Image (cartoon, helix red, strand yellow):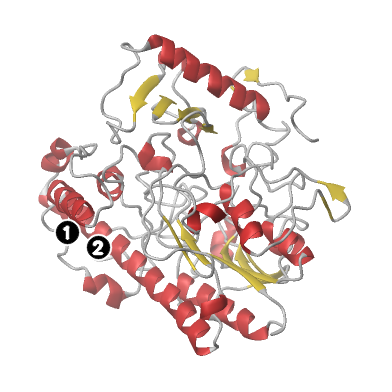
Amino acid sequence: MLLTGVDNHKVGLGSMAELLTPEQRGALGYEGYLNERAATLAERLKMAGFDTMMTGKWHLGRRRGQFPSDRGFDRSFALLQGDHNHFGYDQGPAYRMVGAGRDYVLNGQPAYFPLGVYGDDYFTTKLIEFLKQRQAQRPFFAYLAFTGPHWPLQAPAEDIARYRHHYDAGPVVVQKARLERMKRLGIVKDDVVPYPVDAAAWNRMGPLEKSIQLRKMEVYAAMVDRLDQNVGRIIDYLKRSGQLDNTIIIFLSDNGAEGYPIEHPFDLPQPGKVAGTSIDNSLESVGTARSYTGTGHLWAQVSSTPFRGVKLDMTEGGIHTPAIIAGPGVRSAKLNGTVTHVTDVVSTVLDLVHASVERVVKGKPVIAPEGRSWIDLLAGRVSEVRSERDMVGWELLYRRAVRVGRWKAVFQPSLIPLFKEHTPLDQVHWQLFDLKHDPGEIHDLAAEQPQRLNAMRREWERYAARNSVVLPGRAFAKTSGDTR
């Protein structure tokens, strides 16, 4: 959605390739890679005369014809999978033998990640290298998809040391402190009630388990810190080269905090079975290149404060993420919490650079971007881009949500295909929340307002039909509103 401005169910990523279920395989919009029904922002800007470049995580196709170089990027260095050892130690023959090797491409050709170099450092170095190589007389579009702080939790030792003992008070105390700081900064209202951290789960842990959990959060913070350092490197380069004042910068997160309790790569279920694939998640090792772990649900819920849930959830903690925009045409120092959507980014960028929305790209008709432009919002001419009547819908891994104004309905099985099975859908009930008064989605109003809930469910059904969503035993029909 970020690169096309079109709903993921239309552009081949109704689900991630690794998580497609039998009902979805072969269905339109579930190809498992970024199909050509929509053009990427890189393809559109290239047509408008831009130099285009990207580095970092791709995860939109692993076969030839699906690489960044095939989708509009003049220069690219990309990780094809969705995760990697941040120091490059999963490229060798041992990992390849068990099908867990990671793949990189440089301008469409197989490449090797330098061993021992931290991932986000190298992706930043390559992007700056590409910026130096560009044609100075042409505008540029640069896309950097950092792999931190995605699991595995790994960071340079000096960054981890900076956060040692920083979280020793535990997740409950840290959440409270974060909430108070957010209130002081005006990020949330003074009367907001956060979705609580599971204090009982923390209290049940023994000393060693708590120490490991604390170390994980220290490493997570170090990864975020390192990412911030690398953003600074890019800004410093733009300053030194005299380009900063004429550059629009958009920084955003793709999902909520990761809460899955991962302890090894998904494609390496038996680490160590083949020599050279061992993993060490001991306290002393967590954060090093030898470890492979995630933060877990407790700390992820802290990171989601004040919202409920984490990545893959349809509650706000999974989908309500921050974005920072700066540059020409953007009113400075303005905090805005209005409803926006990731599909808006393409329309916004095209408006900011005065590029037309082409309906034919590379000789093929394409779906037009579906999002709303923020250009008037960024300039301070309006305070919102969606009205109280506008609908936004979501679906991923059978979980669903729909929002209309302040109201949101959520259908969230506790087990999803990621876990090899899913909760029987007849055992799951829709929930209804008033986000204006309950941003933490604590109070389910479904029983009190059944008519409103039914209306919201019908809105989601229309969203699913427009986007050909496939659920177990049911495929929503493609409608005439689709262009192809």
Residue 133 x %, y %: 67, 84
Residue 20 x %, y %: 61, 35
Callout 2 amino acid: Glu
Q: Which residue is mark 2?
A: 218
User: Viewed as shown, does residue 317 lie left or right of 81?
Assistant: left
Q: Is label 2 in contact with label 1 (beta carbons under 8 Å)?
A: yes
Q: Camera-side residue: 219 or 125?
A: 125
The secondary structure type at the circle numbered 2 is: helix
User: Viewed as shown, does residue 423 lie left or right of 395?
Assistant: left
- Numbered circles on residues, count: 2
Q: Camera-side residue: 390 or 162?
A: 390
Q: Quadrant of residue 197?
A: top left
Q: Which residue is mark 1?
A: 167
The residue lying at 58 percent from left, 42 percent from top is: 16
Residue 313 x %, y %: 41, 36
Toward the front, the furthest residue is 381
User: Viewed as shown, does residue 11 lie left or right of 301?
Assistant: right
User: Mark 2: few, some, or many residues within 10 Å (few <14, many ≥20)?
Assistant: many
The residue lying at 71 percent from left, 21 percent from top is: 477
Q: Give the alpha-carbon distance from disc 2 to disc 1, as whole Å.
A: 7 Å
User: Viewed as shown, does residue 288 lie left or right of 119?
Assistant: left
Position of residue 129 relative to residue 311, above or below, is below
Position of residue 146 relative to residue 341, above or below, is below
> Can the viewer see residue 282?
no
Callout 1 amino acid: Tyr
Position of residue 481 relative to residue 237, above or below, is above
The secondary structure type at the circle numbered 1 is: loop
Q: Camera-side residue: 328 or 45?
A: 328
Q: Quadrant of residue 43?
A: bottom right
**Marked residue nearer the N-terminal end (2 or 1):** 1
> Can the viewer see residue 199?
yes
